[in-house]
Image (spheres, coloured by chain):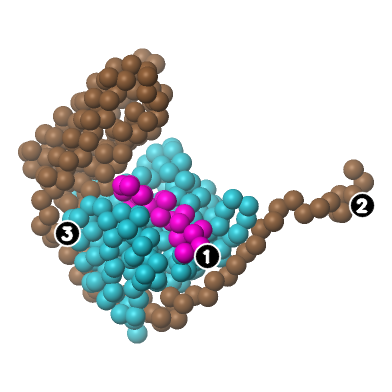
Amino acid sequence: MSEDTHYNQPKRRDVEFINPPNTLKQKVGSGGLSDEILEKAQDLLENNTVDFQPLGEMYLNALMSGVELAKGSDGEQDAEYVIASMLYPTMQLKANGGMFHYPLITQISDKLIQFLEVINEPDLEAIEIVIAFHATIRAVIHGKITGTGGAHGKELLKALNDACVRYFERK
Amino acid sequence: MAYKFEKVSVLLVEDNQPMLELAKSLLLTFGIETVHTARNGEEGFQVYCKENPDIVVADWMMKPTDGISLARKIRNDSMSPNQFVPIILMTGFSERRRVVEARDAGITEFLVKPFNARDLYRRISQIIEHPRKFVRAEGFFGPDRRRKRMSDYDGQLKRETDVRDDDFLVDMIEKDRRGASNNSETN
């Protein structure tokens, strides 16, 4: 290709950049929020009295429905769909546990999300692992283990993590 | 001098009632006086068209219409009163492919749950102080998906699959990770 044709080629991308007016800035002005307001908001968050148990049970039931779907699928259902049916309620447990005083549930669910995000298919061994996570989360909710659970919480997390590691070692 | 949030209106879309109430309380504590609410993306779009709020804060996973679909509608539907409105997406997901999916739907900021009051405030402050250009290209309309890295954090991420490059929202995700890890240590 000659230098001439190089510079005379038609435009290949048609991209328009737009700078919308910053009406939000015009409305709020400057200065941000004071630490006092942010601390008040944080206190509100930390002292919320929402009972996580009904919410947690709802997501656990959804997770178990996903497990049942996986058990009965025999490869007939799309693997992504089956995994998603377990992944989405797990994401909700992760998201909401920590918002409502159960950070251990967030940590446990985060491990399960990591597991479900990378498995190829929901085989029997994978399902067994999901069931173990489910049982652990249920025990945390029923035992009202708020906070991270201290040393016991760390042990639970390690045991679940080890189960995931063993699964991938066998694959 | 402080932000005059009383003039700002927010649409909050969340199907989990306790979470909806908690997030609404935070916004009211910030001084935002008008918080419209909806329980899913479909209802959210109706309220959005009627109220034309200044900011949209939406959960990702909702039925029948999720937060990603809501974002696409706000950006592309001819009924949308303001295609440029900042959209903050709340979700428990933080994996790269999820962030990319949200980015490609036209969301402005990504807020990983669980979050604290400062996390939410940082997202709002970000869209006020550092609004991004919009891009109209074949197959995409939304905030510019590139953003320069601003974080001073140079340590390890929690996971290999978490986002880390000079791309969209990276500094925010990193701060979330750091915040979550700090919270775990203090709890």
Please report the bounds of the magenta region as a residue range.
B59-79
Nearer-the-camera pick, A77 or B20: A77
Point out the frontmost of discs 1 and 3.
1
Judge whether residue B63 is colored magenta.
yes
Task: Give me the residue at 38% from left, 45% from top.
Answer: B94
What secondary structure is found at the residue carrying circle 3? helix
How many neighbours does mark 3 have within 10 angstroms: few (below 14), some (14-19), or many (20 or more)? some
Amino acid type at circle 2 is: Asp
Q: CA distance from mark 1 to mark 3?
A: 32 Å
Residue A109 in picture, x, y percent from top left: 26, 38
Protein chain holding label 3: A
N-terminal-most mark, 2 or 3: 2
* Mark 2 or mark 3, whichever is nearer to me: 2
Say which mark, if any, is on residue B132: 1
Is label 2 in a helix, a strand or a loop? helix
Q: Secondary structure at mark 1?
A: loop
Q: Which residue is mark 3?
A: A46
